[in-house]
Image (cartoon, coloured by chain):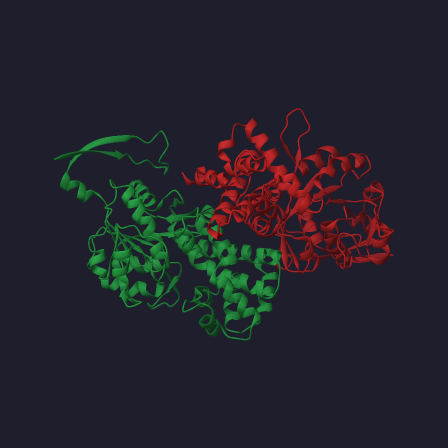
Chain colours: A red, B green
């Protein structure tokens, strides 16, 4: 049998509604259709993974001409209330441990075998804690399609384990192990609000040159409530997601010391200036406009007002306990990523003899290590090179 | 008698500490010294005026080679607890009505005659509610030094009363009536926190070409706690200060409807995009970097989390009352500037057939006028042209 299907001919702009787009009918056989649609694998099924699975389930069902709506989600098997988590997800379509009360579409199927999840996939969505990325990629090496692409949703940095210590982008780690392209999705996206279909935005950073791929990436995530912009500046998008956590610790310290809105605004702004300087200097070219996307100012602001890094910074400024103790007491097993990112940044900036240019990044690490008192961080910032 | 004084020879950059600056001794007589130093007049003595008077009193005493430390502050005379406000300020050095508990330096002298305050001044600092600017300038016309300069600290827009209705910058109103240059100072500056000497930043927008003037402007406001950057993009600085209030009403509406951090972050970002688009389109050239100053993202964020426009927007979304009623009930005689700015913007955008490009600005006016329900504003924003 022959299918008549309609292809939206790609344009350079990403608007789906512009009159310059046009629909072109083509005729194609049953088998070829199966080959053309893109298969998606979600690697991870925590809070954020489950929230994004709700979106991917929806978009792949909605765009069957573009995606195989049978989506596999890799689940690290756990026993929850005497049941296997993967079985609970496949039977009751809910991740009762990490996203209770929210329906995961039935076309998303939990799989516990990582290679089985990914072997046929065209797009691998990475949404796991950043320390697991290396290990998972090593398992996948040689077991995925040669033209597969990655999409990282992980906000953090990897420690460079090569000859030169310092930091690495998570996407660089994925790319180097798997030898594939890798985009990123970042934004002001608290998982439980995304799962409630509250209006929010996200930014995809894509560095390829294929306009069709851009459209596919946008289609894969864009829903009525979750609004996507695609920018060709993936490194900046990823850096925004990682570095904001350091700024949030400084914002929390200011809150904990009892300073008001002006001081916090100054800290957020100076943090933003350090993020831009870092991106421009160490990952050029970086487009200033990218910082106006959801991954930039929006995520930074949200994190500095509501995130767990800010919460930890605030508690730290108010107490005599050390960071590790507070992390255990307050974050229920989760880590405050900004603490580790600040440490890694300082190491790298020291090697580059650039500590004086980034007083906020450096100051946060010094406070966390109790080398200076929280209040001294504010003095550091009063003399920020931005004010010269 | 001859004085030996030292002049810091101005450079193009604003750093005071850079080794490329150099000190040059010159010799000058007693009388000439008096002529060289700049005299400052502060027009206004409310909450913000009194807070800035604390700073001006400090900087003019500190830099006697640059400023006359005898600073006049125009006070609109009121009787407070049976005493004249001007006399209280001059005797007890405290504005007991608008900034109680905070010392105003003794070198700042309250004067109730506007022309007397300003006639000898080189710099006129405007810090009054925006609706009084026109009337005050008319009183000053012909009664000030011909080379005097204005500095506006007023966050708002003026209604154009000429043939073409629409909006005007406050500085344009000052410039056109007094025929003087006018800079602006804007930033994330809640007055009571500035008066407590909490660390904060501000941005001066200066459009002149004289590097010495830039240095003088910075010197006039820059203290250990109040940190100044000067940018040559005064219109953008002023627009940031005025337009943020509209975004804050939208942020308040989102809070009032019970939406979370993601939605609020999206609203703040989309608002920022409309502010940049407005500045670039109607007041070019506008430098994208200016939005990274305190007047830009920092002030926007502070206002959207803590200001009275946000508070009013939140109450409005939760109640059946109209804006005027809520303003009376909640703001103790003050107005929520964003409501009026949104109305003026809509009128102007309508004339320019550009309403579709600014759904947030237009939507806020529609909500305030009860043409649409608060919830519909969120739907407007989901379909923002930014997402195309």
The C terminus of chain A is located in which quarter? top left
The residue positioned farthest toward the top in the image shown: A163
Horizontal relation, residue B269 to residue A197: left or right: left
Q: Relative to A329, does residue B260 appear above or below in the rendering?
A: below
- B180 or A206: nearer the eye? B180
The extreme left residue here reads B1
Residue A352, quarter of picture: top right
Q: Is residue A209 visible?
A: no
The spot of residue B191 in percent (x, y) is 40, 55
> Measuring 48% from the left and 54% from the top, which residue is drawn there?
B276
Residue A327 in which image quadrant? top right
Q: Could you tell me residue B129's position as x and y percent?
A: 35, 63
Percent across and percent down for residue B22 are 30, 30
Closest to the observer: A170 or B128? Answer: B128
Q: Is residue B26 left or right of residue A353?
A: left
In depth, the one of A5 and B309 nearer the eye is: B309
Image quadrant holding the N terminus of chain A, namely bottom right
What count of labels does the image hold?
0
| Residue A161 showing in the rendered view | yes
Q: Tell me: residue A351, above or below residue A252.
A: above
Q: Residue at x 22, y 50 (%)?
A: B147
User: Residue A54 versus residue B255: which sits nearer the camera?
Assistant: B255
Provide residue A315's location: percent of width, then percent of height: 59, 46
């Amino acid at each position: 049998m022959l299918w008549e299907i309609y292809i939206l001919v790609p344009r350079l702009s990403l608007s789906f509604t512009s009159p310059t787009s046009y629909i072109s009918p083509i005729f194609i056989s049953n088998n070829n259709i199966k080959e053309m649609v893109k298969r998606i694998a979600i690697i991870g099924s925590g809070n954020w993974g489950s929230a994004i699975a709700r979106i991917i389930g929806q978009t792949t069902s909605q765009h069957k001409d573009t995606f195989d709506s049978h989506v596999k989600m890799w689940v690290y098997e756990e026993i929850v209330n005497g049941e296997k988590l993967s079985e609970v997800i496949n039977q009751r379509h809910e991740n009762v441990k990490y996203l209770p009360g929210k329906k995961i579409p039935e076309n998303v199927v939990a799989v516990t075998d990582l290679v089985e999840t990914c072997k046929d996939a065209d797009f691998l969505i990475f949404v796991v804690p950043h320390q697991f990325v290396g290990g998972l990629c090593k398992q996948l090496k040689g077991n995925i399609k040669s033209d597969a692409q990655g999409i990282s949703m992980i906000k953090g940095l990897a420690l460079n384990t090569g000859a030169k210590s310092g930091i690495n982008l998570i996407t660089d780690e994925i790319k180097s192990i798997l030898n594939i392209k890798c985009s990123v999705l970042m934004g002001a996206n608290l998982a439980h609000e995304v799962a409630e279909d509250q209006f929010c935005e996200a930014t995809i950073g894509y560095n390829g040159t294929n306009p069709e791929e851009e459209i596919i990436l946008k289609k894969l995530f864009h829903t009525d409530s979750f609004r996507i912009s695609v920018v060709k500046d993936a490194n900046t998008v990823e850096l925004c997601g990682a570095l904001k956590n350091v700024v949030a610790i400084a914002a929390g310290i200011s809150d904990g010391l009892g300073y008001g809105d002006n001081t916090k605004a100054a800290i957020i702004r100076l943090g933003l200036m350090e993020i831009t300087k870092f991106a421009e200097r160490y990952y050029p070219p970086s487009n200033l406009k990218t910082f106006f996307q959801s991954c930039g100012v929006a995520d930074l602001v949200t994190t500095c007002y509501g995130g767990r890094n800010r919460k930890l910074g605030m508690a730290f400024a108010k107490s005599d306990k050390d960071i590790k103790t507070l992390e255990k007491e307050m974050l229920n097993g989760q880590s405050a990523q900004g603490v580790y990112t600040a440490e890694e940044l300082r190491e790298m900036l020291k090697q580059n003899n650039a500590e004086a240019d980034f007083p906020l990044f450096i100051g946060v690490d010094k406070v966390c290590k109790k080398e200076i008192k929280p209040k001294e961080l504010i003095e550091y910032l009063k003399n920020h090179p931005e004010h010269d």
